[in-house]
Image (cartoon, rainbow, N blue to C red):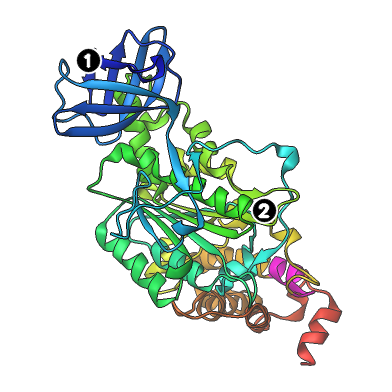
Amino acid sequence: MDSIYHKRHIGAQELTGPILIVEGVENVGFGELVLIEQGDINRLGRVLEVAGNRAVCQVFAGTSGIDREKVRIRFTGSPMTLPVSEEMIGRVFDGLGRPIDGCGEVIGEEERDVNGNPLNPDAREYPRENILTGISAIDGLTTLIRGQKLPIFSGAGLPHNEIAAQVVNQARISKEEDFIIIFAAMGIKADDADFFMRRFEEGGALSRLVTFINLADSPSVERLITPRCALTAAEYLAFDKGNHVLVIMTDLTNYCEALREVASAMGEVPSRKGYPGYLYSDLATLYERTGRVKGREGSITQIPILTMPNDDITHPIPDLTGYITEGQIVLSRELYQKGIYPPIDIMSSLSRLMKDGIGEGRTRKDHPDLYSQLYASYSRVQRVRSLASIIGEDELSEVDRNYLKFGKDFEGKFLNQDKTESRSIEETLNRGWEVLMNLPESELVRLSKEEIEEYRSK
């Protein structure tokens, strides 16, 4: 006989989209795993809300084909879990963590709640070690730090997938140690998934890759579990097994759309642009599962990718993400149309943790001042270009024309690089110096005379 925690209910009170409502429940908890059965139909779900004896359940594969009066609902008494072990490395799973690579089930060392456990802020260790990606715009100007969450804000048609794949293939901890990569795809097209797997194979990353894939034609509400499965695997491999883990998640916009769909089906009062009012806290439950823990060797570094609807950085998804994460890398459609790769808009991008991961003993002594001067100079370029569009380039002062030359070289020689090119930090910083030499020394106010003389003497 089923225990009270495994009590079966026949029939549902209501079916709406992916939502199933059951009356007469007892001892049911939030987040509890639900089994939905009817004839040949076997689906999974989870409890989203409990009010008295009424439970609202989210069905991962949707409620189509389910008869409201005949369906059997069983509450398992436990949250959704994922079997975790080091056998996951090199394997491919669906959005719910089930193997889809034909290599059999994963024998888990333990079952982990996919919702994770919040880290005590006092247990966090401040991230300081940089991760060099071989991409000048990132290493030189928005340096990624191990344990950081640094999203990529992109737009439809921009090469965010190429940049993410390049980071995965080129980012290294040391010559002796590589990252374990967790790749979570949410609602992406099959050809995008094939692109990632092909690039990872070409870069030799498959042997250290754990992949979770929810394609565009997969159930949309399954996308709400996909990143949680990926981060559960990351936590186990990082904090229990002492590995450094890099998590790539794409596309967070599809995740948020699925969240909006569920909220709408539940009849919740919408907030900005129809998204639920708890969008911020929900995203925080994903992003804050990143970092380093005192006394433990491993780390989780997270690069979420999101496409901004209409390239609008004030849209709720990038806006709220920017409040939670430690910076962002923003892609520019204008640079992309100029043929610049990667088209990173450095004026809108920043890494809030880079100041502690660069400089003497970490990258190079002149890095902080050089980075500051490049930013200041490129900012001046934007103003000079606006002025030139009004009065004409011939009417500009000689110094302003020097800035135009600097801007052209900065975009063409510093930002622009091949999609498979990996630059050392030395080459990146030297290119920065090279393009700055277009400017008179009187304009290099953020660099010391000693640094300028030292560069020119090389």
Q: Secondary structure at mark 1?
A: strand
Q: CA distance from mark 2 to mark 1?
A: 53 Å
Which disc number belongs to residue 10? 1
Q: Residues within 10 Å of mark 1 (few under 14, many from 20)?
A: some
Whether residue 315 is visible, yes or no, is no
Along the polypeptide, which appears first: circle 2 or circle 1? 1
Q: Residue furthest front?
A: 1
- The residue singled out by tag 2 in the image is 352
Q: Magenta stretch containing residue 337, yes or no?
A: no
- What residue type is disc 1 on? Ile
Q: How many marks?
A: 2
Residue 230 vs residue 263, the one in the foreground: 230
Q: Magenta stretch containing residue 372, yes or no?
A: yes
Residue shown at 27% from the left, 15% from the top: 9
Q: Secondary structure at mark 2?
A: loop
The segment highlighted magenta reads 364-373
